[in-house]
Every structure is written in C-alpha cells, then in structure tokens.
C-alpha cells in the first residue's frame, strides 16, 4: 500500500508502514512540526490525526509567518 507525498518541490511515492499510519506520524517521520505545516489529503484540508489510505495524495504546505 502506497501514497503520494507532495512537499515543497518533492513528489514521491511512499509505503504505508501500518494500518493506523496518520498524517501526524508522517510529519514526525519527516522531522517537521505540526505547527508549521498544513496538511491536505486528496485536495481537502485535514487534521493530523487523519489516517493515510492506499492511493491517497498527501500534500504538506509550509506555513510562512513573520512580523
């Protein structure tokens, strides 16, 4: 079972390691902070607890903020 990850200029197919693999797990695996990215599953905004399914397209969008 695989999904497609879109992050910055990266587009890659990744394996789903287990049935309960969530976007939060992916964010942690990539060494990112949930406070600095917005996640989309198949084009829809989702929360980090969303489970990644076979064939999903997951897009992580870096939040830019400043003052």
Image (cartoon, rainbow, N blue to C red):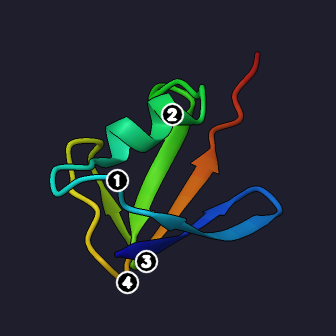
- Residue beneath label 1, please? 17
User: Which is nearer the N-term, disc 2 or disc 3?
Assistant: 2
Residue 41: percent from left, percent from top? 37, 69
Residue drawn at point x = 48 percent, y = 37 percent: 27
The image shows residue 31 at horizontal and vertical percentages of 60, 26
Asked if marks 1 and 2 touch (Cβ < 8 Å), the reply is: no
Q: For marks 3 and 4, give the one nearer the viewer.
A: 4
Q: Mark 3 highlights which residue?
A: 43
Secondary structure beneath dot 1 equals loop
> Which mark, residue 55?
4
Which of the two labelled residues, at mark 3 and mark 4, occupies the earlier sequence position? 3
**Crowding near pointer 2: few (<14 within 10 Å), some, many (20+)?**
few
CA gap between label 4 and label 2 equals 19 Å
Mark 2 or mark 3, which is nearer to you? 2
The CA span between labels 3 and 4 is 13 Å
Q: Is residue 32 above or below residue 24?
A: above
Q: Residue at x 45, y 73 (%)?
A: 3
Closer to the chain start, of discs 1 and 3, is: 1
Name the disc covering residue 29, or none. 2
In the displayed structure image, the side of residue 11 where residue 47 appears, left or right: left
Name the mark on residue 59: none
Q: Nearer the viewer, residue 36 or 10?
A: 10
Query: In whole angstroms, how far apart are the C-alphas of marks 2 and 3?
Result: 21 Å
């Amino acid at each position: 079972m695989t999904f497609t990850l879109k992050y910055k200029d990266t587009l890659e197919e990744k394996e789903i390691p287990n049935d309960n693999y969530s976007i939060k797990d992916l964010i942690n695996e990539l060494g990112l902070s949930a406070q600095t990215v917005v996640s989309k599953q198949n084009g829809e905004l989702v929360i980090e607890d969303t489970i990644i399914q076979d064939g999903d397209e997951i897009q992580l969008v870096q939040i830019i903020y400043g003052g």
